[in-house]
Image: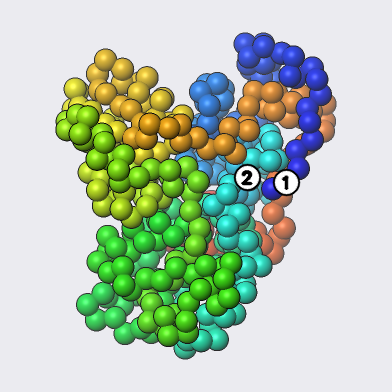
Amino acid sequence: MLYQPPLPPKYTDLAPDELARRIRERKSFFGKKLVILGHHYQQDEIIELADYTGDSFKLSQLAAAQKDVKYVVFCGVHFMAESADILTDESVQVILPDLSAGCSMADMAHIDHVEDAWEHLTSVTDATIIPITYVNSSAAVKAFCGGRDGACCTSSNARRVLEWALADERPERATGQRKVLFLPDQHLGRNTAYDMGWPLESMAVYDFRKPGGGLTDEQIRQATILLWKGHCSVHQLFTAKQIDDIRALDPEFKVIVHPECDWTVVQKADLAGSTEFILKTIDAAEPGSKWAVGTEVHLVHRLAKRYEGVKTVRLLSGIQCLCTTMYRIDLKHLLWCLDELAEGRIVNLIRVDPETRTLARLSLDRMLSLIGTGAAKTARA
């Protein structure tokens, strides 16, 4: 985690309404030169001030599509700001309001551990291993995959990317000549591969904390999908028992969860899909329908408020499943970085070095070519 210095006292003394007013003034001052991005998991007060709202990759693409933008303030976490820097023109300055806003999942796949694991895996098997990294990963890990003929993926397109990586391998006639190393979220990898027909027995979890990943050489050779031992601290909080409890409380509830949830949760839920899938599904649902949602609490509460009196939306869990690092981005830090920018000082600049940027871009472009959207665009004209 990067260190964020304490803010000057004048910011902590301001009321929320005053902070918001001053942020709007700064936005007006910068005009089209500035764009503020707000991730779905952000607090409502940040979302209200954002120019665009979405998941991490969608926001990065939106930033890259803007004309005349000089500054992108990403109200998300560190890996998201890195992705925005990779996809935007090099003249664009990407700012993260609070440097301590990291991602525990991304941190579970440190590049040093990934490189050590790769050296071990390639020494014990002659199979072709394709590294696939979830977008929730550092630029260094994206670059690692890009430089080894791998690709990035999102929760929306993970299946398509895995199909490409495994090529002619099929569960019923697997040859063992191709394998996937899926980083850093074991649950998204497991849930996606299982949905494709791969049995759990074809998968093995590589625990970077243990010698040899906690696997024998034979287990590595036998596995088709090698899952990195990482997870989302938010989605890890949802359980199969919570689904049982909801259905016992009211069987009319449909349960929809994110594929970062544990396999047992996804199997018991009615539906599973990306954040955008969850939003579209509930939006299209019949009036009067009831939904228990397994994802971050701010998004769920926003949905509940949006459909109040029309549809019932509640959090699957009885506890507050909060992305605590995302929560570090607040009005105080947002105003501070805009004030500094107005004075000609760029604080909390997120810049990916050229070599990492090039290789990480390869992994993103491979993903985009697979889903038919073409290469990621950086042109401003």
- Residue 164 sits in quarter: bottom left
Q: Say whether residue 17 is left or right of residue 190.
A: right
Up-down relation of residue 104 to residue 74 (above or below): below
Q: Residues within 10 Å of mark 2 (few under 14, many from 20)?
A: many
For the question of whether residue 79 can be seen, the reply is: yes
Q: Which residue is mark 2?
A: 102
- Residue 301 sits in quarter: top left
Numbered disc 1: secondary structure: loop
Q: Name the residue located 25 percent from the left edge and 66 percent from the top edge.
A: 197
Say how many tags the image has. 2
For the question of whether residue 380 can be seen, the reply is: no
**Residue 43: image location, x then y, percent:** 53, 26
Type of residue at label 2? Answer: Gly
**Residue 121: image location, x then y, percent:** 52, 80
Q: Name the residue located 31 percent from the left edge and 17 percent from the top edge.
A: 308
**Residue 246: image location, x then y, percent:** 26, 34
Q: Say whether residue 92 is left or right of residue 229.
A: right
Up-down relation of residue 30 to residue 237 (above or below): above
Q: Residues within 10 Å of mark 1 (few under 14, many from 20)?
A: few
Which disc number belongs to residue 13? none
Residue 42 versus residue 211: which sits nearer the camera?
Answer: 211
Numbered disc 2: secondary structure: loop
Upstream in sequence: badge 2 or badge 1? 1
**Residue 235: image location, x then y, percent:** 43, 45
Query: How many angstroms separate mark 2 from mark 1 (CA)?
Result: 8 Å
Asked if the residues shown at circle 2 and circle 1 are in contact, with their CB atoms under 8 angstroms apart, the answer is: yes
Which disc number belongs to residue 2? 1
